[in-house]
Image (tube, grey):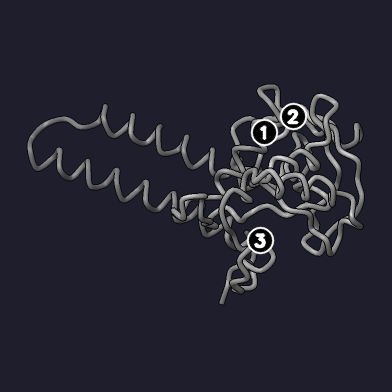
Amino acid sequence: MAKLPSEWKVYQRKRGLNGLASRVRRVWAAGRASGRSVLPFAVVGALIGVGAVSFINLISAKSLPFSPSLWFCEDRTHLGLVGKAAVIDGDTIRLCGLDTSVRLYGIDAPESGQRCRNAAGRSYRCGSEATAALSDLIGRTGRVSCERKDVDRYGRIVAVCRAGGLDINADMVRQGWAVEYRRYSDGRYRDEEAAARDERRGLWAGSFVAPWDHRRGEVNVYR
């Protein structure tokens, strides 16, 4: 049976502390058997272990995202959807100080592990390329502002986001690293997708399975 979140945190803490105690006992026993003093090494090891366990507890307690740039953000919820962003994948970001991620409205990018084929027919990691493209659009400062449109069934905020005044949702489609999510977009990015397809940019340079089909395990190839 799956552990509940609170039970999982307790389990992880116990596991970490038990593992630390076991390692200290092994080092101590090895030192006594060899006749050398291992007290300094045991103390240093214990301190490192306690620090590691404390850090794990900090992440668990605050539900921090696995992105160093967002670990020590202050709560900025009252300021709205504005701030430094970390890219999760080609259509999802996490804003500093928010406890949920932001899904880019009206677009769908390849899944993180998804593969596509380039113009030469070779397989490549199109999900990783889409993630990199979104990171480039957001830029070095990582600062974005988003306009909330909805909340999806996973509790994520659905929004149109801008970086440097540019609509990054539209730019992802325009560059060909995302496609219009027609089911939800109301035709907002139809022209951007048509331009990317006609000029063979990004995904359209080769062939790919639409992200929504990929998630369902269907193989409808777009070219």
Q: Between 135 and 81, which is closer to the camera in this rendering?
A: 135
Instruction: Tell me the kind of residue under disc 1.
Output: Leu
Q: Residue at x 61, y 63 (%)?
A: 209
Residue 89: x, y in percent? Answer: 64, 47
**What kind of residue is marked 3?**
Pro
Q: Are marks 1 and 2 in contact (CB under 8 Å)?
A: yes
Name the element at disc 3: helix
> Is 26 rendered above or below residue 78?
below
**Horizontal and vertical percent for residue 146?**
86, 38
Q: Are marks 2 and 3 in contact (CB under 8 Å)?
A: no
Find disc 2 in the rendering and name its residue. 84
**Residue at mark 1:** 70
> Where residue 181 sits: x, y (%)?
79, 58
Instruction: Tell me the residue that label 3 is attached to.
Output: 211
Compared to residue 84, the image places residue 52 above or below, namely below
Screen quadrant of the C terminus: bottom right
Q: Earlier in the sequence, mark 1 or mark 3?
A: 1
Label 1 or label 2, whichever lies nearer to me, is 2
List the single residue furthest toward the front.
198
Q: Secondary structure at mark 2?
A: strand
Spatial CA distance of label 2 from label 3 is 27 Å
